[in-house]
Image (cartoon, rainbow, N blue to C red):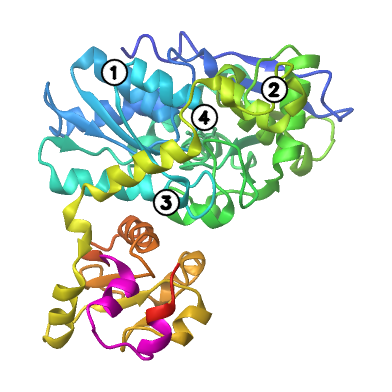
Amino acid sequence: MMGLLSSKENPTPIVRLNKVVPFKHTRVYAKLEWYNPFGAVKDRVANNLILDAEERGLLSSGKKLVEATSGNTGIGLALVGNLKGYSLRTPLSDQIPVEKRTVLRFFGAEVIELDDALCPLPGAPEGAIARARETAQTEDEFEILDQYINEANPGAHYRTTGPEIWRQTQGHITHFVAGLGTCGTITGTGRFLKEQNRAVKVLGVAPEDGHDIPGVRSKRQLGQTELYHPEEYDAEVDVSDEEAYDLCLRLNREESIVAGPSSGMNLAGAFKLVPDEPGNVVVVIFCDNIFKYASSVLRHFPELRPPGKSDESDSGAPSRNEQFLANLVENLKNPHDSIRVKDLNVQLESSARPVLLDIRSEEHFAESHIPGSINIPQDDLSDRSAELPDDRDAAIVTVCNIGKFSKYATLFLKSKGYRNVRSAKGGLDEWVRKGFQTTNAVVAANDSQ
Ligand SMILES: Cc1ncc(COP(=O)(O)O)c(C=O)c1O
């Protein structure tokens, strides 16, 4: 397997960009990571995560892997796993392009699609991370390699990507630019390059909040990865969807480089961060190619839709409603996630009283809530997580109006490491129906979501 993956003899190519580069002096090179055997920078990581787990004795043939991914790590794990006899279950966001979800299934992976609202921000697979970690905790046959915390992720880049770039530029590289996803690429490659020459600038590029660039994370979303080490990078910059997709289109049309959206983003970031000076040699990571992103491209360039087709209905994918219902059913299958209001009422009377977290809006909370609840609206959970208990074993029950959004909050909290979180089944409506006390029972009884 290692022989297939990038190595000293067989690196992914770097090519000089000409037509789209706004510089007179600075030379810009793209490292074309889709030349890895399964088409993405993540092949390096998938291979190294598995090798590392084997070395640590965590894997034996027949073992099942569970991993949250934005698609590319999943593809790598599925295919390396097929060779070695490990099957893959991957919970992922349904924001991930249908092309990636489909090929994952084609490769034999079990794909669990989690609905949009599981990710408070589009593209952020918090719910998926929580689900993968929970599966590994509760189902013995599953092993999680956890690319968000595993040093074998940056380790893959320290061992391969960094040395390849150093050799390919004959040590002349002055700036290294990578997008921020798990941050394995920037951290591992950056460490290696700085060890060769402290003057090499390591630059990170992030999308804006609410972005539509699969594989990368906005600054706010980066809290989910422990491999983000801003103190090791020289600068970071944000790039908008429009800037990323426009440059992606230009790369394809003007340079005939079949780069995907995150490559456009990384290059746009390089143009913002690197000065135009003689001697500057920039290497930008181009994570994967455009062929997996037809559905994303159609969203950003609607004029490319076939005549007469106004939406993505020709993709063969289930409608959003169908998908939503399927996801809901999937989410409800886990009985340990929720608590009946009857049992909650008993627990609230006992010494093992859980923390009650009401995730509805401040207005709804002010109208009526279960006495003793704290209120952090769902959209603020990420920003206000400092208000949650420090103890990751603290019992927490999440509450909303009907017990739907509180399930998403539960998954979010699990992704933050809370082990004992459940949502109140049926929510405040059910609590009121059963005749339990609220701060204002009359309003609550009429209140519905
Ligand atoms: C397309 C794409 N771009 C960027 C990245 C980010 O790389 P990293 O996770 O090493 O930060 C990924 C990671 O999955 C990716 O798939």
Secondary structure under the numbered disc 1 in the rendered image: loop
Q: Earlier in the sequence, mark 2 or mark 3?
A: 2
Q: CB at mark 1 closer than 8 A to ligand 1?
A: no
Residue most extreme to the bottom: 439
Label placed on residue 29: 2
Amino acid type at image mark 1 = Gly
Q: Earlier in the sequence, mark 1 or mark 4?
A: 4
Where's the N terminus, which quadrant? top left
Give the image quarter of residue 426. bottom left
Real-space Cα separation, disc 1 to disc 4, in angstroms: 17 Å
Of labels 2 and 3, the one closer to you: 3
Label placed on residue 118: 3
**Closer-to-camera residue (51/408):** 408
Label placed on residue 353: none
- In the image, which residues are magenta? 424-444
Real-space Cα separation, disc 4 to disc 2, in angstroms: 27 Å
Real-space Cα separation, disc 1 to disc 2, in angstroms: 36 Å
Residue in view at x 23 percent, y 31 percent: 65
Amino acid type at image mark 3 = Leu
Label placed on residue 97: 4
| Residue at numbered disc 1 | 108
Q: CB at mark 3 closer than 8 A to ligand 1?
A: no
